[in-house]
Amino acid sequence: MSATDAGTYWNDIYAARPAAASPRPNACLTTTVTGMPPGDVLDLGCGDGGDALWLAGRGWLVTAVDVSSVAVGRLTRLAAEAGLADRLTAHHHDLRTSFPAGAFDLVCAHYLHTPLDLDRTAVLRTAAHALRPGGRLLVVDHGSTAPWSWTQDPHLRYPTPQEVAADLSLSPGAWTVERADAQVREATGPDGRTAEVTDHILIIRRTA
């Protein structure tokens, strides 16, 4: 599928639902980042923008990217309305063909899953190389299928955080895995249903 088609696919997804007035940050982000000194952060696949807005509100300088121009436009408006436009910029990127320039103290990739073709390993490897020394890559993946997920394939297997880290083939002399485990939580879907879901959490720190 072409970059244009990917943008159209996700634009249709976002346009089919009302814009979130107050998108919430992901729970793993808030527990991981609280206590860290603010710096430059890259939010990959920003979606409704809950993570980006939360980070900007705590002093981080946020670069948020998404393949959906609808999502990017909505987040830009929310940042302006919240008085955060000086700390948050949202950009349209198809990560299959381009990656944001710059060096970052934190790169977040929450649920960077898609039914379309995407070399996710290459994207995350590039993200790890975009970290400054001491910076962290936070990857939170689905570890189970929620009732409201776009896929209900009972045979779908989710890679473990250890497998994701191994696939990145990062030099242990320059990067170290700080966390690689699973966490169970109660989640609420877009239709208000609740369910117990599993998150796979990976944190990699650049040491050199």
Image (cartoon, grey):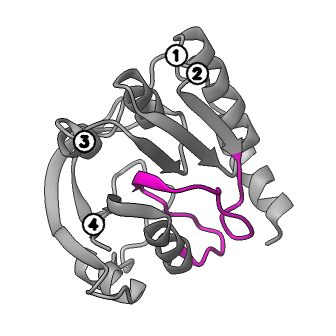
Image disc number at residue 205: 4
| Residue beneath the point at 77% across and 53% down | 7
The label shown at residue 86 is 2
Q: Amino acid at mark 3?
A: Val
| Marks 4, 3: nearer the viewer | 4
- Amino acid type, residue under disc 4 in the picture: Arg
Mark 1 and mark 4: Cα distance apart in space: 33 Å
Say which label, 3 or 1, has the lower sequence index.
1
Please name the residue that numbered disc 1 is placed on.
Answer: 21
Determine whether 102 is above or below 128 in the image.
above
- Kind of residue at disc 2: Asp
Whichever of callouts 1 and 4 sits on the residue coming sooner in the sequence is 1
Q: Are marks 3 and 2 in contact (CB under 8 Å)?
A: no
Residue 119 falls inside the magenta stretch:
yes
Of labels 2 and 1, earlier in sequence is 1
Give the labeled residue for mark 3.
Answer: 33
Residue 99 seen in the current view: yes
For label 1, count other residues whose C-alpha is less than 10 Å away and answer few (under 14), some (14-19) or many (20+): few
Report the magenta stretch's main SS: loop
Badge 4 or badge 3: first in the primary sequence: 3
Task: Tell me the quarter of the picture where residue 184 sits.
Answer: bottom left
Q: CA distance from mark 3 to mark 2?
A: 21 Å
Mark 2 or mark 1, which is nearer to you? 2
Identify the residue at image location x=42%, y=48%.
148
| Local crowd size for mark 4, using a 10 Å CA cut-off: few (<14), some (14–19), many (≥20) | many
Helix, strand or loop for disc 4: strand
Residue 111 horizontal/vertical position (percent):
42, 56
Tell me the magenta residue range: 92-120
From mark 2 to mark 4, how far is it between C-alphas? 27 Å
Name which of mark 2 and mark 4 comes first in the sequence.
2
